[in-house]
Amino acid sequence: MEQRAADRAAQAKRIAAEKAAEVKRAAEQAAEEKRVAEKAAAEKLAAEKAAAEKRAAEKAAAEKALVEKRAAEKAAAEKRAAEKAAAEKALAEKRAAEKADAEKRAAEKAAAEKAEAEKRAAEKAEAEKRTAEKAEAEKRTAEKAAAEKAQAEKRAVEKAAAEKAQAEKRAAEKAEAEQRVAEKAQAEREAAEKRAAEKAAAEQAAAEKRAAEKAAAEKAAAEKLAAENAAAEKLAAEKAAAEKAATEKAAAEKAAAPEAPRAADLETNTVTPGTVPSGQGEVLPWNRDQAAPGQGSPANAPTAEPAAAAQEEVAAPVAPVSPPPRKRPRPKPAPDDWKKGISVFGGG
């Protein structure tokens, strides 16, 4: 898991470095485009300024040529007037009255022409002034428009660069958010898998523990039952051995004892069960056949059998009838409900 986290961190670092390089390249490209746009605007402004200056120079040259032409025409007119005046002067000597009149008219005409010329010159100067002011205003308007256009283009370039940077930032934030969501989902999936594995391991351990406890309980119950069976069998064997030993001892004593009076036999046979010594049982009628085959015979047994038979015949009618020995009840096996659902012999 740590290796995967380190790989993811390295990958995120590489992606961040690549994005930073892309942002840097975009910024450099935007700066280059900005410089190119500013240079183009400056060149365009310089070209427009040069064209305006050229037009102004051409206009000034045209106006100067027009003024010179008009001055030449005026000089020629004055020359013609002088020549005319000389001719008129020559004629004046001939025609004094006519000359005086002609000179007066010429003077009045010259004054009128001069006034007209001065008027036209003033109007021309005023027109030239208006033209110059108009050209200057147009020049200022063109320069202002060019400046506003350059500023607008600059703002457009800066806006495009800002929008591009914002878009790249949003893309980076979106990628980072998606990566965080993916990492969170991976961590939750791993945690869920870990919890499932731990739960499965715990359930398996609990099942194994229950199986072991069940097996141990069954083994303990089986061992307890076997011990109880062995104890019961041992007790029965000991009882059978004690009864057999008592029977053999009584038969041996009867066979070895001399013949006694009938009264003594009667007294002996009518003794109460409480007076029998401990460990010595009575020879009961229903036990004679069982004890007789296994009894050992002493050396003088053949000579004593008639006496023993006679004693038994005499004592049999008066022998007290004792209840048959009860078998000791086998102890009940321990209940197997110490844990519900588990049996000694298996099963649920």
Image (cartoon, rainbow, N blue to C red):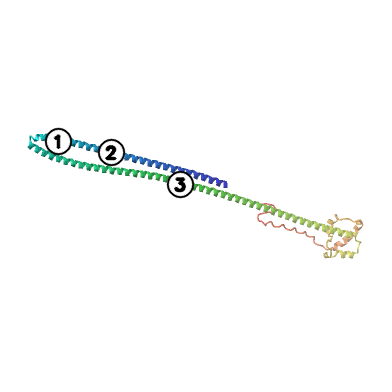
Crowd around label 3: few <14 · some 14–19 · many ≥20 (10 Å) = some
Where is residue 181? Give x, y as percent. Answer: 51, 48
Residue for badge 3: 169
- Say what secondary structure mark 3 lies in: helix
Whether tag 1 and tag 3 are in contact, CB under 8 A, the answer is: no
Instruction: Please identify, in this view, whether the residue under mark 1 or under mark 2 is nearer the observer.
Output: 1
Whether tag 3 and tag 2 are in contact, CB under 8 A, the answer is: no
What residue is drawn where x is 89% and y is 65%? Answer: 264
Where on the picture, by quarter, is residue 342?
Answer: bottom right
What residue is drawn where x is 16% and y is 36%? Answer: 78
| Residue 348 showing in the rendered view | no
Where on the picture, by quarter, is residue 247?
Answer: bottom right
Residue for badge 1: 82
**What amino acid is labelled 1 in the image?**
Ala
Residue 265, compared with residue 126, is above or below; it is below
Q: Which mark is residue 57?
A: 2
